[in-house]
Each structure stands twice: as C-alpha cells, then as structure tokens.
Image: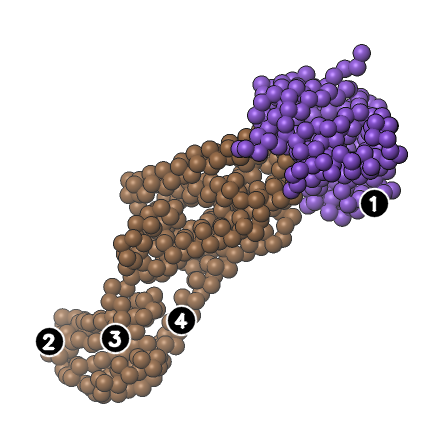
Amino acid sequence: MKQFLTFVQKEFYHVLRDRKTLLILFGMPMVQILIFGFALTNEVKNTKLMIVDHAKDLASAQLTAQIEASRYFEIEKSVSDHRQIEASFKEGSVKVVLVFPLHFYESLLHENKSQVQIIADASDPNTATTLINYLNAIIQDYATELKNPLSIPYQIIPETKMLYNPQLKGAHNFVPGVMALVLMLVCVMMTAVSIVREKETGTMEVLLVSPFKPILVILSKAIPYLLLSLVNVISILLVSVFVLDLPVKGSIFLLFAESTLFIITCLTLGIFISIKTSSQQVAMLISLMGMLLPTILFSGFMFPIENMPIPLQIISNIIPAKWFYIIVKAIMIKGLSFAGIWKETLILLGITIFLLIVSLKSFKIRLA
Amino acid sequence: MKEVVIKTEALTKRFGDFVAANAISFEVYKGEIFGFLGANGAGKTTAMRMLCGLSIPTSGKASIAGFDVFRQPELIKKNIGYMSQRFSLYEDLTVGENITFFGGIYGLSDKQLRQKKDDLVTNLGLQNEVNKLVASLPLGWKQKLAFSVAVLHDPKIVFLDEPTGGVDPLTRRQFWDLIYEAAERGVTIFVTTHYMDEAEYCHRISIMVDGKIEALDTPSNLKKIYNTGSMNDVFYQLARKAKRSD
C-alpha cells in the first residue's frame, strides 16, 4: 500500500509540474464553458428585427415602441410587403420579423384577443429560440399593461413559425456536452500519454523489472486523473450554476456518481490506447481522432443523432459519451432520479467492463 | 568455491521461426563483473530481458540469485536492480524525489530510505542538487545517479543495459569506479556494452553471435586464444561470422 501511495504521489508531481498539462486540465474546461456560455448571451443583444405593420394603429405603434425600447432588439426597417421578408432573411440583414395583421387593435378591443406573427431565422436554432422567448415576453408584458382590471383581459396570441429548422433540434444544453468532452479529453488523452511517456523514456522497463506489480503501475497512473477529473466536474458545475445561472435540478450525488463512472470508462479507454501504442504522438493522435472526434460527432451534443442516417445512429450507441450526455442532461436539466436513467447507466457500465477486460487481456499478452 | 548467482542451461527464446537466443548456457559468480557483448541483433537484449523477468523463455533453465525464472519471477525482481541504456530516472522529479520514489517501490522503510538517501547523496557529492530537477543535471551525473538508484535496495545482481551510451570517456571512467565499488560490496554486475575499453574492465566477458554464445572467458585469455593484442580484434573476428543483422 505504501508503495502504491509513493507511486501516486510521483504521478501528482508529474501532473502538477507540467504547466501545459495543468493549463489543458483546468484552463480548457473554463474557457469552453465561458465561450459557450457567453457566446449565447451576446447574440441576443441588439438583434436586427423587421416590422411588417399592416395595422398601423395605436396598439401596433405602442408595441413597436416597446420592442424598440428593449435592449434586445433594434428595429431595422418597417415594410409592408411580404416579399421583402424572404429577401431580408437571405441577405441576413434581419433575424426576426414581426407581422401585425390588419385591424390588430380593433380585434383586441372587440374580441379581447388578437394575433401577431413572428418569423425567425432558425438556421441557428439556439438564437432563434432565445429571440422568440424575448419577443414573447415583451408582447405578454404589453398585453398585461393594456389590461383593464374590470374587463376580461386582452389576449395577444403570437403565432410562431420557425424557418429552416421547424423542430428546433439541438438546443443549447452545452454544459453536459462540455462535461462529456472535457472528461473524455482529460482522462483518455492524459492517461494514455502519461503511460506511453514512460514507455518512451524507458522508465517503464525499470518499473516492470521492479517488484511493483504492473497492474498497479497502470492503476496508480489512473488515480490522479480520476481525482483531477472530479475537481474538473466540480469546477464546471460551479461555473454553470454561479456564472451561467444553470442550476442542477436533480441529485448532485447522483451526478457525481455517474460522472465517476464515466471518468472510469474514459480512464480505461486511455489505458487501452496506451497498451496498444508506443509513442506519445501516436497516443495523442488516436485519442484526438479516435476518441474526441466521435465524441463530438456522436454524443448528440453538437449534432442531433435523430437526424443521422441509420448506420451512424447505430455507431453512436458504442460511444460512451452519448450515454453520459443523456444521463447528465436528465439529471441537470430534467431533474430525473436514478429510476429515469438506470438503462443508460447500465449501458455505460457494460461498455466500461468490456473495455476493462479487453485492456487487461492485451496487457498480459504484452508482458509475455 | 565461488558462489554462482546466475546460472542458465540451454536458455532459448523463439519469436515464431526466429530464434533470438539459442540454447545459451553460462554461469556468473557473486561479486563478478560480467560483460555481455555482441553486435546489434545478436540477441543480447533478449537474453537480458529473460534474466530480468521481462520476457518468458521458450525453453531451457535459468536461476537468478537462486530463484527460478519460470516459477519465482517475483522473488527475482526483489533481488535484482536494472538500469537501461535509455535514461531511467524521471527528469521532472528532483534528485531527492527520484531516490524516494525508486526506494519506495522496492518497499524500503522510511528510516532505511532516509539513511540510503543521505549516503547516496554524500557519496556522489550531490548535496547541493538534492532539490534540483534531474533534467538540470549533466548527463554524466544523471547516469551515475541512475546507477546508484538501481543499487539502492541492495540487490544481489544489477543488470546494466549499455549504461554509458553517449557519455564522455572521463565520466565513463568515473561510472566504472562506481561499478567496481558495488562489485567489492559483493554485488554481481551484468553489463552489456559496445565499448571495448569497457569490456577490458570486466572480470569475464561473453560474446554473442547470432543468438549463441561464441566465446566466454577473461579478457586476457580471449586475447590469447584469438592471438591478438586488443579486444576490438577479438570482437571483430567473432562478429564478422554473423549471418544475421538488424
């Protein structure tokens, strides 16, 4: 046991002395979270909006004024011709169009409700959703203001139409995605590289000649990265809760337990790569191309899996990050308990055990 | 009667059809400096790896420090030290941390470790460098430190795989002083080298050609047998018979 601790301590020296590793380890998750987080909030400020006003009455003028007063929108131009809408979208000069029908105010007064049409450029679905939500809020505010306490409240019912991507797949659940990505990168690449580095420098032979058990060499390499990855999970969650206002709805313990499972999956993958390769560059390339790329492509974080051709959908099932992404989303955003994610957990566990067995097998062969 | 610490009988290693080490038999005595020579590809490394427990022999017998290579590899590992041609310390750890680490994985107690560390550092004159990273030391010092670390746990036998590659002659001489000191303490030294002047420092040498041991004797006897004044010539006469190369 003491031997093991000596070894783990040595691994910590390696990690903590290497500034580049530290930068990747702790800098990258923060940068990714902040980039994803703030890129999202910046985009909805001063968005170009086009008004198509067929009503030209008191209510449409008041509502237009309110929209203009908000910091989210900038009214680009007002037109009365529908054909200009498509042209403006294609030019990219507007992101949202608000259409007032004829007799907007009149129907509000007489029927107590009226309609407006919002057309958004949903080629960027995240932005479109956010814009529509803001616009809806402004309209609802206006409707409430208009309300006469004695009469039936006025209703303006916005009818929303999403251009180019009607289902709005791929909403911005970036925190679970970044978590999967970062853990994958840290655990797989760092573990693989750190083991292969010992092979490359020749220290691995010295270790194998020593009475220290080879399997412990591998284990003690994995432990520092397990701990550091948990620190990473904590820091990502802190940033997402306190800086980005994205709360964790479900159990935090469950989230940590699942993260630990995924970290172990990634460590096993890293170990597997390190057993199969003998140079740091190859290990890094395989980790990046063979692990990180599929993670980005097939986890569902960047590209919706449902839209992929069937063969690719099937492939996506063997990507551990896909299951982790589903689990984290379920816990963080939907607030599900273990009962809601046991299937995904079981699949992840199965992949981990499979990788572990394969790694141990090939490790033995190498020693002989 | 000399105590035998390494004994092999027809030790063989095959990789498919290729016989890397072909029925090698020899004995090495306690406190001896045994030179293991051979051209590249002659099978030196394979033989050495089998003796260290890094590779399992295909057939034959071998006992190291009284333990069988097939049945007691773990006991062998406790009783040998190893230093490879490739530098075998951690560059990003300090001198002191390297000593603590390697002592630690051999299971030395804290007290033993402190004592050994002090002795080693004083012996090598590294008092001012204990807390410096190994990367900052000159190559010669690194090599001496690596050797001292390899014998830190008082092994019965230490295997040195081309330990002085790329080192200047003066530092090599100093390195050999360390080897002699260890041998006088009763440590058996098993060393591979390509430097013929180093071969002359050994008590006995063996020369491997094409997986077989072609010659085994003291340097002076070998020179007599091959009727020449230099080890270089002895080696040349044997090695050019080789049919295989890398």
In this rendering, position of residue A161 left or right of residue A23: left
Label ID, residue A111 = 2
Marks 3 and 1 on same chain = no
What distance separates the C-alpha of mark 2 from that of mark 1?
100 Å
Give the residue at mark 3.
A119
- Residue B41 placed where, x, y %? 66, 38
Picture residue at 34% right of the left edge, 69% below the top: A124
What distance separates the C-alpha of mark 3 from that of mark 4?
17 Å
What distance separates the C-alpha of mark 4 from that of mark 1?
64 Å
Picture residue at 57% right of the left edge, 34% below the top: B18
- Residue B61 placed where, x, y %? 62, 19
Say which of marks 3 and 1 sits in front. Answer: 1
Marks 3 and 2 on same chain = yes
Say which of marks 4 and 1 sits in front. Answer: 1
For the residue marked with disc 1, what is the amino acid?
Answer: Asp
Q: Which chain is purple?
A: B
- Residue A215 placed where, x, y %? 54, 32
Label ID, residue B191 = none
Local packing at callout 3 (Cα closer than 10 Å; few below 14, some 14-19, many 20+) is: many
Marks 3 and 4 on same chain = yes
Marks 4 and 1 on same chain = no
Local packing at callout 2 (Cα closer than 10 Å; few below 14, some 14-19, many 20+) is: few
SS for dot 2: helix
If the image is split into quadrants, where does the N terminus of chain A sit? top right
Give the residue at mark 4.
A43
Q: Nearer the viewer, residue B128 or B41?
A: B41
Q: Is residue B36 above or below residue A288?
A: above
- Residue B237 placed where, x, y %? 78, 36
Return the chain for callout 4. A
